[in-house]
Amino acid sequence: MPVTNPAQHAFPPGARLFPWSFRAGLVLLLAWGRLPVVWAQSSAPAAGGSSAQLAPGPDSGVPPTLSEQANPGDFQVLSPAGPNRGGLDEPFQYGPIIFRPRVSYRYLYTDGLQSSPGSLSKSVVQDVSPGLLVDLGPDWVLDYAPTLRYYSDPAFRDGVDQSFSLHGGITLEKWRFGLAQSFTDSSSPTVETGSQVDQQVYGTFLSAGYAINSVLSLDLGGSQNLQFAGGSTSAGGLQSTREWSTMDFLNFKFWQRFTFGAGAGGGYVLSDNSPNQTFEQFQGRFGWRITDRLSLQANAGLDNRQFSGGQPGLSNPTYGATLQYQAFANTSVFVNLSQAVTQSILQDSLTVNTVYGAGVSQRLLGRLHLSLSGNYSEEDFLSTLAAISTRTDDNYSVNARLSCPFLKRGTLGLTWQYSHNQSTVSGLTYGTTQLGFDVGYSY
């Protein structure tokens, strides 16, 4: 299972009442406004389940709009991720548009990084990432960042990763319309293949919410996910996929702090060298603000798939739950679990990902910020040719980060991560320890 980012399992920015997104990678959440209930869904999974072996950077995640930052949502106990914007003077503001340039540097020592299956390497990894975030008014945000990556071990290829996102929405009477567009280009070592793979992912998500009355509301959503990974690795051939899907919910607001939704949807997956897929999904979900400091959000459903060529179909349960607790003003805790079906970049494969995670965030001595998290996951690779399991990975990781601000706009951080992956395929079992520091400056 890929190394997971603890920030992915806290509620992401932009999720108002139902921030569930259980696919790995870039999460784009769309919903802000006056509707009693809105929902969020990932629009661009970052190359299916093939997350990078490297520890995530400090700025991972989609930046919230100013409205999302100011109004995190009825069931959002913890503050949205990302730096607080608007508290200082804005030197690059032109009317309603604010340009926020940034730059960061990370030094990471890795022990046990895989350059190919069965080949473990020690390497220093250095990242230089200039970036630009543009606040296009309170409800829209655009963000772009290239990352120049250099390895000390020649077994790895230096390269430039890129990430782009645009998301926001508009309100027209009782309707709320949202758009999210994303692009990622990466060449990091992946857990799925045990080696570096060039991947490009384009994601588009459209949403519409309608407040029928004070009790009932509709959430409509459609997405497109284009995932390209060419060539082959020692772990097997690769596939590129194009997925189109929809998921629509009817929500019931039973009382101010409890909302339930029932939904159905489906989609089509076109693969360049594997069987094509059609699927149907059914799901129930709820959000419960138990107290001002405690909230619970959960969903459960079924993913039913059919494959071209007469292969047997597959049905798998899907579910997720996140508990948030703001224990004290400077102490927060989250616990989560999820299971979802995702596309694999390995040929003739899809995956069932089951993840359990927990974390705590604590401010120390007024200026230091400590984050601790742990995850255990199981990734089951299923053949789209024979509907049987071909590989299982068990992964656990422990993450720690200590950061502090400097010069008002700067951040200095120390990062440590240990991850271990146990695979039923020879050569893909490994353990890695990563230790490093990062420094960044942003407006």
Image: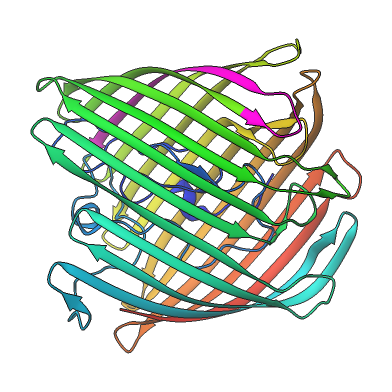
- Locate residue 415, reporting x and y percent: 57, 72
Picture quarter containing residue 55? bottom right
Left or right of residue 414, residue 52 in this image: right
Residue 168 locus on image (x, y percent): 27, 49
Residue 207: in sight, yes or no?
yes
Q: Is residue 274 magenta?
A: yes
Indicate whether 5 appears above or below 223. Answer: below
Q: Is residue 174 left or right of residue 51?
A: left
Q: How many marks?
A: 0
Residues 128 and 237: in front is 237
Q: Is residue 361 above or below residue 268?
A: below
Q: Residue at x 30, y 48 (%)?
A: 14
Q: Can the viewer see residue 11?
A: no
Q: Quadrant of residue 5?
A: bottom right
Closer to the camera in the image, 407 or 249: 249
Q: Position of residue 186 (x, y in %)?
A: 63, 60
Segment colored magenta: 270-290
Residue 443: horizontal and vertical position, in percent? 30, 78
283 falls in the magenta region? yes
Residue at 48% in and 79% down: 104
Front residue of 416 and 58: 58
Quadrant containing the N terminus in the rendered view: top right
Farthest residue, direction front: 272
Q: Main secondary structure of the magenta part?
A: strand
74, above or below 233, in the image: above
